[in-house]
Image: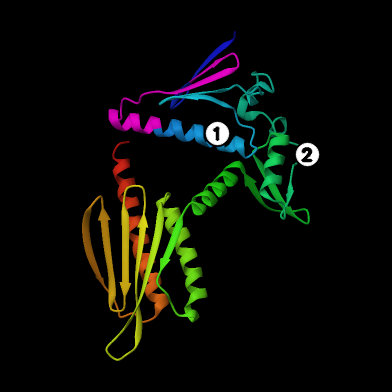
Protein backbone atom coordinates (compact mmCIF):
# COMPACT_ATOMS: atom_id res chain seq x y z
CA UNK A 1 0.00 0.00 0.00
CA UNK A 2 1.45 3.34 -1.09
CA UNK A 3 1.65 5.97 1.61
CA UNK A 4 2.31 9.70 1.28
CA UNK A 5 2.58 12.38 3.94
CA UNK A 6 2.32 16.16 3.52
CA UNK A 7 2.91 18.90 6.08
CA UNK A 8 0.54 21.80 5.40
CA UNK A 9 0.07 25.15 7.13
CA UNK A 10 -2.66 23.93 9.50
CA UNK A 11 -2.67 20.17 9.15
CA UNK A 12 -0.81 16.98 8.35
CA UNK A 13 -2.28 15.08 5.40
CA UNK A 14 -1.56 11.38 5.03
CA UNK A 15 -2.63 9.29 2.06
CA UNK A 16 -2.92 5.56 2.76
CA UNK A 17 -4.35 3.52 -0.07
CA UNK A 18 -7.91 4.67 -0.73
CA UNK A 19 -8.07 6.85 2.38
CA UNK A 20 -6.91 10.39 3.16
CA UNK A 21 -6.31 11.42 6.78
CA UNK A 22 -6.24 15.14 7.53
CA UNK A 23 -5.28 16.02 11.10
CA UNK A 24 -5.11 19.61 12.36
CA UNK A 25 -1.99 20.10 14.44
CA UNK A 26 -1.51 22.08 17.63
CA UNK A 27 -0.35 25.71 17.34
CA UNK A 28 1.85 26.39 20.36
CA UNK A 29 1.71 30.16 19.92
CA UNK A 30 -2.00 30.10 20.78
CA UNK A 31 -3.56 29.70 24.20
CA UNK A 32 -4.21 25.96 24.65
CA UNK A 33 -7.97 26.27 25.21
CA UNK A 34 -8.38 28.67 22.28
CA UNK A 35 -6.26 26.46 20.02
CA UNK A 36 -8.35 23.40 20.83
CA UNK A 37 -11.60 25.26 20.19
CA UNK A 38 -10.37 26.66 16.86
CA UNK A 39 -9.13 23.26 15.64
CA UNK A 40 -12.38 21.52 16.64
CA UNK A 41 -14.57 24.18 14.99
CA UNK A 42 -12.56 24.24 11.76
CA UNK A 43 -12.44 20.44 11.52
CA UNK A 44 -16.19 20.17 12.03
CA UNK A 45 -16.92 23.05 9.65
CA UNK A 46 -14.71 21.62 6.88
CA UNK A 47 -16.35 18.18 7.09
CA UNK A 48 -19.82 19.75 7.06
CA UNK A 49 -19.09 21.87 3.97
CA UNK A 50 -17.60 18.89 2.10
CA UNK A 51 -20.67 16.74 2.90
CA UNK A 52 -23.17 19.49 2.02
CA UNK A 53 -21.42 20.14 -1.28
CA UNK A 54 -21.58 16.44 -2.16
CA UNK A 55 -25.30 16.29 -1.38
CA UNK A 56 -25.81 19.17 -3.82
CA UNK A 57 -24.02 17.30 -6.60
CA UNK A 58 -20.49 18.67 -6.22
CA UNK A 59 -17.84 15.91 -6.70
CA UNK A 60 -16.22 16.12 -3.26
CA UNK A 61 -14.69 13.20 -1.28
CA UNK A 62 -16.90 10.95 0.85
CA UNK A 63 -16.39 11.58 4.59
CA UNK A 64 -15.84 8.25 6.39
CA UNK A 65 -15.06 9.49 9.90
CA UNK A 66 -14.47 12.67 11.89
CA UNK A 67 -12.97 13.24 15.34
CA UNK A 68 -12.14 16.47 17.17
CA UNK A 69 -9.10 17.21 15.02
CA UNK A 70 -9.10 14.68 12.17
CA UNK A 71 -11.13 13.92 9.06
CA UNK A 72 -10.92 10.57 7.27
CA UNK A 73 -12.10 10.88 3.69
CA UNK A 74 -12.11 9.18 0.32
CA UNK A 75 -9.07 9.55 -1.93
CA UNK A 76 -9.91 11.07 -5.30
CA UNK A 77 -7.48 10.46 -8.15
CA UNK A 78 -6.28 13.32 -10.33
CA UNK A 79 -3.25 14.96 -11.92
CA UNK A 80 -1.27 17.69 -10.19
CA UNK A 81 -0.53 20.76 -12.29
CA UNK A 82 3.22 20.31 -11.79
CA UNK A 83 3.03 16.80 -13.23
CA UNK A 84 1.56 17.90 -16.55
CA UNK A 85 5.00 18.85 -17.81
CA UNK A 86 8.52 17.95 -16.66
CA UNK A 87 10.15 19.70 -13.71
CA UNK A 88 12.94 21.00 -15.93
CA UNK A 89 10.77 24.06 -16.58
CA UNK A 90 9.90 26.26 -13.55
CA UNK A 91 6.28 25.60 -12.59
CA UNK A 92 5.09 29.20 -12.81
CA UNK A 93 6.57 29.55 -16.31
CA UNK A 94 4.41 26.75 -17.74
CA UNK A 95 1.91 28.04 -20.34
CA UNK A 96 -1.65 28.26 -19.02
CA UNK A 97 -2.81 26.25 -22.05
CA UNK A 98 -1.47 23.12 -20.32
CA UNK A 99 -4.02 23.30 -17.51
CA UNK A 100 -6.95 25.27 -18.90
CA UNK A 101 -10.33 23.63 -19.53
CA UNK A 102 -11.45 23.66 -23.15
CA UNK A 103 -13.93 24.10 -24.62
CA UNK A 104 -15.38 26.56 -22.13
CA UNK A 105 -18.41 25.10 -20.35
CA UNK A 106 -21.05 27.84 -20.00
CA UNK A 107 -24.67 28.14 -18.94
CA UNK A 108 -27.45 30.44 -20.01
CA UNK A 109 -28.50 33.19 -17.64
CA UNK A 110 -31.91 31.49 -17.27
CA UNK A 111 -30.41 28.17 -16.08
CA UNK A 112 -31.32 26.95 -12.57
CA UNK A 113 -29.01 25.86 -9.74
CA UNK A 114 -29.55 22.15 -10.40
CA UNK A 115 -28.39 22.55 -14.01
CA UNK A 116 -25.27 24.47 -12.92
CA UNK A 117 -24.41 21.86 -10.26
CA UNK A 118 -24.87 19.08 -12.84
CA UNK A 119 -22.45 20.83 -15.23
CA UNK A 120 -19.87 21.10 -12.46
CA UNK A 121 -20.19 17.42 -11.60
CA UNK A 122 -20.22 16.17 -15.19
CA UNK A 123 -17.17 18.16 -16.28
CA UNK A 124 -15.37 18.14 -12.90
CA UNK A 125 -15.15 21.95 -12.74
CA UNK A 126 -15.63 24.38 -9.87
CA UNK A 127 -17.11 27.36 -11.72
CA UNK A 128 -19.39 28.02 -14.68
CA UNK A 129 -19.43 31.27 -16.72
CA UNK A 130 -22.95 32.62 -17.26
CA UNK A 131 -23.82 33.99 -20.69
CA UNK A 132 -26.71 35.78 -22.37
CA UNK A 133 -26.85 35.77 -26.16
CA UNK A 134 -23.34 34.24 -26.05
CA UNK A 135 -22.01 37.30 -24.19
CA UNK A 136 -20.44 36.63 -20.73
CA UNK A 137 -22.52 38.17 -17.94
CA UNK A 138 -20.98 36.64 -14.82
CA UNK A 139 -19.74 33.44 -13.19
CA UNK A 140 -21.10 30.99 -10.61
CA UNK A 141 -18.72 29.05 -8.36
CA UNK A 142 -19.24 26.18 -5.94
CA UNK A 143 -18.80 28.67 -3.10
CA UNK A 144 -21.57 30.87 -4.58
CA UNK A 145 -24.00 27.94 -4.66
CA UNK A 146 -23.15 26.79 -1.12
CA UNK A 147 -23.47 30.31 0.28
CA UNK A 148 -26.85 30.81 -1.41
CA UNK A 149 -28.17 27.47 -0.15
CA UNK A 150 -26.96 28.22 3.39
CA UNK A 151 -28.75 31.58 3.35
CA UNK A 152 -31.96 29.95 2.11
CA UNK A 153 -31.70 27.34 4.85
CA UNK A 154 -31.11 29.94 7.53
CA UNK A 155 -34.01 32.05 6.32
CA UNK A 156 -36.35 29.05 6.13
CA UNK A 157 -35.56 28.04 9.71
CA UNK A 158 -36.49 31.40 11.23
CA UNK A 159 -39.89 31.80 12.84
CA UNK A 160 -41.05 35.42 12.60
CA UNK A 161 -44.08 36.06 14.81
CA UNK A 162 -46.03 39.31 14.60
CA UNK A 163 -48.32 40.19 17.50
CA UNK A 164 -50.85 43.00 17.19
CA UNK A 165 -52.65 44.68 14.32
CA UNK A 166 -51.92 47.66 12.13
CA UNK A 167 -53.77 49.84 9.68
CA UNK A 168 -54.29 48.21 6.29
CA UNK A 169 -52.63 51.15 4.53
CA UNK A 170 -49.34 50.28 6.23
CA UNK A 171 -49.42 46.50 5.80
CA UNK A 172 -47.80 46.04 2.37
CA UNK A 173 -44.95 48.46 3.06
CA UNK A 174 -44.47 47.06 6.57
CA UNK A 175 -44.15 43.50 5.18
CA UNK A 176 -41.44 44.62 2.76
CA UNK A 177 -39.51 46.44 5.49
CA UNK A 178 -39.74 43.46 7.87
CA UNK A 179 -38.56 41.04 5.16
CA UNK A 180 -35.60 43.27 4.24
CA UNK A 181 -34.49 43.97 7.80
CA UNK A 182 -34.94 40.36 8.96
CA UNK A 183 -32.64 39.27 6.13
CA UNK A 184 -30.05 41.77 7.34
CA UNK A 185 -30.39 40.59 10.94
CA UNK A 186 -29.84 36.96 9.88
CA UNK A 187 -26.81 37.90 7.81
CA UNK A 188 -25.23 39.76 10.72
CA UNK A 189 -26.11 37.29 13.49
CA UNK A 190 -25.44 34.17 11.35
CA UNK A 191 -27.89 32.11 13.42
CA UNK A 192 -31.26 33.21 14.78
CA UNK A 193 -33.74 30.99 16.66
CA UNK A 194 -36.78 33.22 16.38
CA UNK A 195 -37.96 36.80 15.91
CA UNK A 196 -41.02 38.37 17.52
CA UNK A 197 -42.45 41.78 16.56
CA UNK A 198 -45.00 43.23 18.99
CA UNK A 199 -47.20 46.08 17.68
CA UNK A 200 -49.31 48.18 20.06
CA UNK A 201 -51.59 50.98 18.89
CA UNK A 202 -52.03 53.82 21.38
CA UNK A 203 -53.79 57.19 21.43
CA UNK A 204 -52.40 60.47 22.66
CA UNK A 205 -54.29 63.02 24.75
CA UNK A 206 -55.65 64.67 21.65
CA UNK A 207 -57.13 61.42 20.35
CA UNK A 208 -54.49 60.89 17.67
CA UNK A 209 -53.20 57.35 17.18
CA UNK A 210 -49.58 56.24 17.26
CA UNK A 211 -47.69 52.95 17.53
CA UNK A 212 -45.32 51.39 20.04
CA UNK A 213 -43.26 48.56 18.55
CA UNK A 214 -40.98 46.00 20.18
CA UNK A 215 -38.61 43.70 18.26
CA UNK A 216 -37.29 40.58 20.02
CA UNK A 217 -34.51 38.54 18.38
CA UNK A 218 -33.26 35.29 20.00
CA UNK A 219 -29.80 34.05 19.01
CA UNK A 220 -28.05 30.97 20.45
CA UNK A 221 -26.59 32.89 23.39
CA UNK A 222 -28.47 36.16 23.64
CA UNK A 223 -31.86 37.84 23.49
CA UNK A 224 -31.90 41.25 21.80
CA UNK A 225 -34.81 43.61 22.41
CA UNK A 226 -35.39 46.93 20.66
CA UNK A 227 -38.41 49.13 21.46
CA UNK A 228 -39.49 52.22 19.55
CA UNK A 229 -42.23 54.76 20.05
CA UNK A 230 -42.85 58.43 19.29
CA UNK A 231 -40.41 60.53 21.29
CA UNK A 232 -37.38 58.27 21.22
CA UNK A 233 -36.04 54.75 21.13
CA UNK A 234 -35.42 52.39 24.02
CA UNK A 235 -32.78 49.76 23.48
CA UNK A 236 -32.99 46.88 25.91
CA UNK A 237 -30.34 44.17 26.09
CA UNK A 238 -31.00 40.91 27.96
CA UNK A 239 -28.18 38.40 28.26
CA UNK A 240 -28.49 35.18 30.23
CA UNK A 241 -30.85 36.77 32.72
CA UNK A 242 -29.00 40.05 33.16
CA UNK A 243 -30.66 43.22 31.86
CA UNK A 244 -29.33 46.52 30.75
CA UNK A 245 -31.42 49.44 29.51
CA UNK A 246 -30.10 52.27 27.41
CA UNK A 247 -32.32 55.16 26.28
CA UNK A 248 -31.44 56.86 23.05
CA UNK A 249 -32.97 60.27 22.61
CA UNK A 250 -34.40 61.15 19.24
CA UNK A 251 -36.94 63.28 17.57
CA UNK A 252 -40.62 62.41 18.02
CA UNK A 253 -41.73 59.77 15.56
CA UNK A 254 -45.43 59.56 14.83
CA UNK A 255 -45.27 57.60 11.60
CA UNK A 256 -45.72 53.84 11.99
CA UNK A 257 -43.08 52.99 9.37
CA UNK A 258 -40.49 55.18 11.10
CA UNK A 259 -41.19 53.52 14.44
CA UNK A 260 -40.99 50.02 12.88
CA UNK A 261 -37.68 50.72 11.16
CA UNK A 262 -36.34 52.35 14.30
CA UNK A 263 -37.01 49.22 16.40
CA UNK A 264 -35.51 46.87 13.78
CA UNK A 265 -32.43 49.03 13.27
CA UNK A 266 -31.97 49.20 17.03
CA UNK A 267 -31.62 45.42 17.19
CA UNK A 268 -29.36 45.37 14.12
CA UNK A 269 -27.10 47.90 15.82
CA UNK A 270 -26.84 45.82 18.99
CA UNK A 271 -25.92 42.68 17.02
CA UNK A 272 -23.34 44.61 14.97
CA UNK A 273 -21.72 45.96 18.15
CA UNK A 274 -21.49 42.47 19.65
CA UNK A 275 -20.03 41.13 16.41
CA UNK A 276 -17.32 43.81 16.37
CA UNK A 277 -16.47 43.12 20.02
CA UNK A 278 -16.07 39.40 19.27
CA UNK A 279 -13.83 40.12 16.27
CA UNK A 280 -11.60 42.39 18.36
CA UNK A 281 -11.45 39.80 21.14
CA UNK A 282 -10.59 36.99 18.71
CA UNK A 283 -7.83 39.02 17.06
CA UNK A 284 -6.06 39.27 20.41
CA UNK A 285 -5.53 35.49 20.40
CA UNK A 286 -3.64 35.42 17.08
Q: Please tell me which residue is depicted at 59% across the width and 13% down the height of the picture.
A: 17
133 sits to left or right of 272: right
Q: According to the image, label 2 marks what residue?
A: 103
Question: Going 47% across and 69% down the picture, which residue do you hit?
Answer: 177
Q: CA distance from mark 1 to mark 2?
A: 27 Å
In the image: residue 101, left or right of residue 90: right
Q: Is residue 212 left or right of residue 171?
A: left
Which residue is label 1 attached to? 50
Residue 74 at what x, y percent from top left? 59, 23
Check whether the beta carbons of the residues at disc 1 and disc 2 lie within 8 A of each other.
no
Residue at far top of view: 1
Instruction: Decide which of tag 1 and tag 2 comes sooner along the chain.
Output: 1
- The magenta span reads 13-40
Classify residue 104 by image quadrant: top right
Can you give x and y, in whole percent of width and height, for residue 148 in the image? 56, 49
- Which residue lies at the image location 52% right of the left edge and 74% below the top edge? 172
Mark linked to residue 86: none
Mark 1 or 2: the one toward you: 1
Q: Is residue 113 above or below residue 45?
A: below
Q: Secondary structure at mark 1?
A: helix
Which residue occupies 44% across, 27% down?
9
* Foreground pick, 280 / 202: 202
Amino acid sequence: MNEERFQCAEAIVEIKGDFVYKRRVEKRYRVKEIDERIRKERTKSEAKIISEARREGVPTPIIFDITDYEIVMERIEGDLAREVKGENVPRMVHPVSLIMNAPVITADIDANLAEIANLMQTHDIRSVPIVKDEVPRGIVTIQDIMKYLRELKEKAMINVEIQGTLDEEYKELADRIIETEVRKIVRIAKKVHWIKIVIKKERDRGGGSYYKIGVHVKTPDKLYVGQSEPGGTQTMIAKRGAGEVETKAGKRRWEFIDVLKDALLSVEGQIEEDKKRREIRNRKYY
